[in-house]
Image (spheres, rainbow, N blue to C red):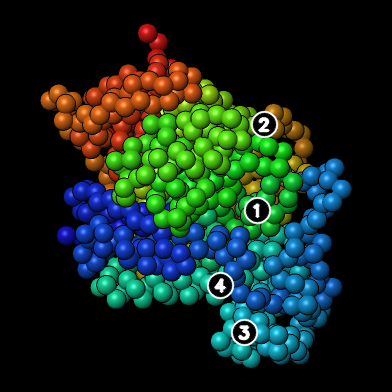
Amino acid sequence: MNLRIATDIGGTFTDLVAVDEKGKTILGKSHTTPPNFEEGVIEVIKKSGITPKEITDFIHGTTTIINALTERKGAKTGLITTKGFRDVLELARCNRPDLFNMVFAKPRPFIPRYLRREVAERIAYDGKIVIPLEETDIEKAVEYFKEEGVEAVAVCFINSYANDVHERRTVEKVKELWPEIFVTSSIEVTKEWREYERTSTVALNSYVMPVASAYVNNLEGRLCEIGCDAKKYIMQSNGGTTTFEQAKQTPINMVESGPVAGVYGAAILGKAVGEENIIAFDVGGTTAKCSLIDQGEVKVTTEYRIERTERYAGYPIMAPVVDIVEIGNGGGSIAWIDEAGSLKVGPQSAGALPGPVAYGKGGEEPTTTDACLLTGRLSPKNFDNQVDMEHVAKVIQQKVGEHFQMNAEDAAMSILRVAESNMFNALKLISVRRGYDPRDFTMVAFGGGGPMHCAYLAKELNVRKVIVPVAAPVFSAWGMLMTDVRHDYIQTNIRRMNEVSAQELNRMWDSLIVQADEQFQREGVAKDHVVYHFIADMRYMGQEHTVKVNVPPLPWTQESKEEIIRCFHETHEHFYTYKLLETPTEIVNLHLVAYGRLDKPELAKIAPQTDSLESAFLEKRSVYFTEDGWMETPVYSREKLGSGVVFDGPVIIEEAAASTVVAKGQRLTVDIYGNLVIETEVQE
């Protein structure tokens, strides 16, 4: 038997999905094991009963990189930059996100000023060498970094995206002088313009390189120890995968490794069931994440920032990342009372250890999971451990109920209202706030907590249909099995469309295609498995911002140029409500998306329901619903339901590690693939 497996490390659980050549699916879930996260991967493989030698493809998603950044657990890093540009990280941008905050402070650079060294060199905007590279400055910088105990080095020179000769030579020189050091140049990560964003990106990449290298090496070593000799890939933030070796060179591309797989999986599922407008909604143990998929297209941006809030600018990462809104509200999010006496939920999380009170591992702070237990959304029978319900109620009563003079059940419902309000605001950010009508979209809800909250939130948002997919608790891992190897090549090359010839544009694209072909050849991807997608970042002359335009494949002709300009006008009007037909247009960035196609499993169909539902019935229990209060609610086992089954709410469908809650006035149908399809408003 040959198996393709995917593992996804989350804040609380490590998930596994495996599919054999006949389409049979194996699911697994175990607790995440910080700080040795690779042990959780090995544990979930063993727990699932998979024989390692049967694994042909291994795909992995990890939170290691984002954790290293947010927890400041990266390496001591030095920066080599152009003379006069030492303070780019400090200057940052002047567009303060919180205009009236009199005590606003810019983000503190990951590389302190004393670890930034200047080198005499200068490249002009057009790529011409203005000042030759002074190699003695590199030697002095390396000696200084050695004395300071630096563990990684970043190199970023002004305008190197236009001519990378100085950066390449600097990296060569550093490696000659200091072979064991981790070193990255900006051109290895991005060839887009904007000095601050480029410098920030390469600084963060070098900062996490030692962490990423150690993690990937440990994981690869443990997989070899158990006899796994599969092709190994790691999920990237752009929605595709890359090899273990490439992941160690540009680990910043894994900053949102796990979450984006679920979004990509939602897009694949949507196409399979005829729904191309999707709102992907993922609630895990630590966070809730959502993303909008328009006409089957997963949105990718290079304007991603970690730690960005309404009042804090965060740190830019100029790498392709699936456009996700993420908030600190998940199953393990802690409920607490702030200084003003208001109830808050998250962003602090109980994580895997000690976890919610219900886990019985020493957690003494009430969480969303504990609140779901007290309100009947979750059953204590569906936990791996014996749940002490009296203790759960006592903690919620003491930490929340007493402050508001309410009983434990009402306090638990208050926790859920606050948590769902936070999730609702995130859903509005990616839909209504961007000019989309939620009535035109279907929600795909997954993760351990997504199915519990989706029906209520969809109704509030005016989404008429919700799909809870098969393997919902481990859906991000399932999404990884549907991905391809993907590399993005983005090159800034500003040209006015009325002045540049189609032949010159073709030559610019050809240079990117050569890079892609060479990389896929190194990675062992067959030429006939490589597919290209072309995107141009365009703008009107005189504008600052650009819009992404899907452009036709090569070769381009004069007619192609005219078609591209027309598409740009339409795209600009879609996002900004106007177009300037008489204004000249410019191409700013060429963006080549190169896919190395991998074999993927097909969606398996399930048998129709032919017998009565008695075998699937679990119990009837009292559940608290926001609008209807306590209601006696039937509970069914998902694995025993066939296609064609229809339930009118209230009803709960339980499976391992998840519970789908359907309220009164809603209808649930099991489709031919085993997905739970919820109509949020049923006309009687």
- Identity of the amino acid at label 3? Glu
Q: Residue 172 carries which label?
A: 3
- The CA span between labels 1 and 2 is 31 Å
Q: Quickly name the residue at label 2.
A: 573
- The CA span between labels 3 and 2 is 47 Å
Q: Position of residue 49 (x, y in %)?
A: 21, 59
- Identity of the amino acid at label 2? Glu
**x 39%, y 18%: residue:** 664
Camera-nearest label, 3 or 2 = 3
Q: Quickly name the residue at label 4.
A: 209
Placement of 176 over or under 387, stated as above or below:
below
Circle 1 Cα neighbour tier, 10 Å, few/some/many (<14 / 14–19 / ≥20) = few
Placement of 245 over or under 177, stated as above or below:
above
Q: Residue 307 carries which label?
A: 1
Q: Nearer the viewer, residue 243 or 102?
A: 102
- The CA span between labels 1 and 4 is 20 Å
Asked if the residue at tag 3 contacts the one at tag 4, i.e. Cβ–Cβ closer than 8 Å, the answer is no
- The CA span between labels 4 and 3 is 18 Å
- Give the mark nearer the N terminus: 4 vs 3: 3
Camera-nearest label, 4 or 3 = 4
Q: Is residue 445 visible?
A: no
* SS label for mark 1: loop
